[in-house]
Image (tube, rainbow, N blue to C red):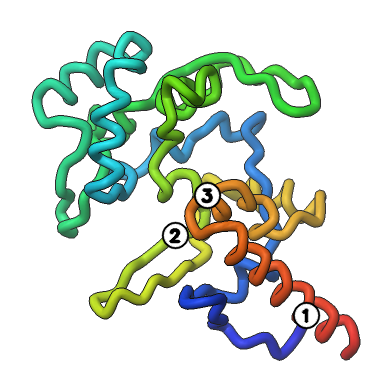
Amino acid sequence: MTDIPPILQIGDILLSSDIITETFCCDLETCRGACCIEGDAGAPVTLDEVMQIEDSVDRVWNGLSASAQAVIDRQGVAYTDQEGDLVTSIVGGKDCVFTCYDDLTLADGTVVKGCCLCALERAHRANAEASPFVKPASCALYPIREKTFSNGTVALNYHRWDICRCGREKGKALGLPLYQFLKEPLVRRFGQAWYDELCAVACQLTVAGDSR
C-alpha cells in the first residue's frame, strides 16, 4: 500500500496508519510474556481501573508472590512514576505486581511451560462473573499505546519494542494486521461500532493500495 496518510481519524480517535498496515501476533511460545516483566515502570492505568483492580485484589491475592504482596501492602496497586503517570506497582524495579507464572495452552494445543501471565486476566478467564475486570487497557492493547492530550483528544500509536520482534515475525508469517490481532481489546475499549468503522477504513485503504 502506498500514499496512506501517517495519521488517520476513526470517529473521534486519531491513530497512526501503521496500526492498519503493520502485521503482528504475540508469540508467547517464544517470549513467554516478557512484556510483563521488562521495563522500568508499571503499566499505565486510569483511576477507574485502579478502583476495579482494588476490587479484584482479594480474588488474585493467593496467586501473587510474597514480594508482590509486600509491595501492594506498602504502596497499593498503583503509584505515580517519574513522568507523573499513574502505573501499576512493580517488584524489584520491573515486574508488575500482578505477574504470575503458569503453563499456558495455546489455541493450537501447544503448551507453553512457565509462561508469564497476568493474575487479573487469569482470574477473569477462569470466572468472568466473579472477576469481571480483565486487565488494564494499556496491557490489553499493547503494542498499541494510547495517549490522551490536554484537549481530550485520544491518539493511538504502534510501539515497537525489541522484545516483541518475534511477534512481528509471527504476524508477518500469518499475514495478520495489528488491528485484527487486537480486535477483542479494541472493541472492549472503543466499542464495536468504532471497530467496524476502523475495519471499513482499512478495507478501503487496502483496495486503494492494491489498485495502484
Disc on the earlier residue, 2 or 1: 2
Q: Quadrant of residue 42?
A: top left
Q: Quadrant of the N terminus?
A: bottom right
Q: Residue at x 43, y 30 (%)?
A: 132
- The circle on residue 188 is 3
On the image, numbered disc 2 is attached to which residue? 145
Q: Amino acid at mark 2?
A: Arg
Three-letter residue code for mark 3: Arg
2 or 1: mark nearer the eye: 1
The numbered disc on residue 204 is 1
In this rendering, does residue 116 appear at all?
no
Q: Residue at x 50, y 59 (%)?
A: 190
Disc 3 versus disc 2: distance between alpha carbons? 15 Å
Q: CA distance from mark 2 to mark 1?
A: 24 Å
Front tag of 3 and 2: 3
Q: Secondary structure at mark 3?
A: helix
Residue at far top of view: 62
Nearer-the-camera pick, 141 or 35: 141
Left or right for 95, reference 16: left
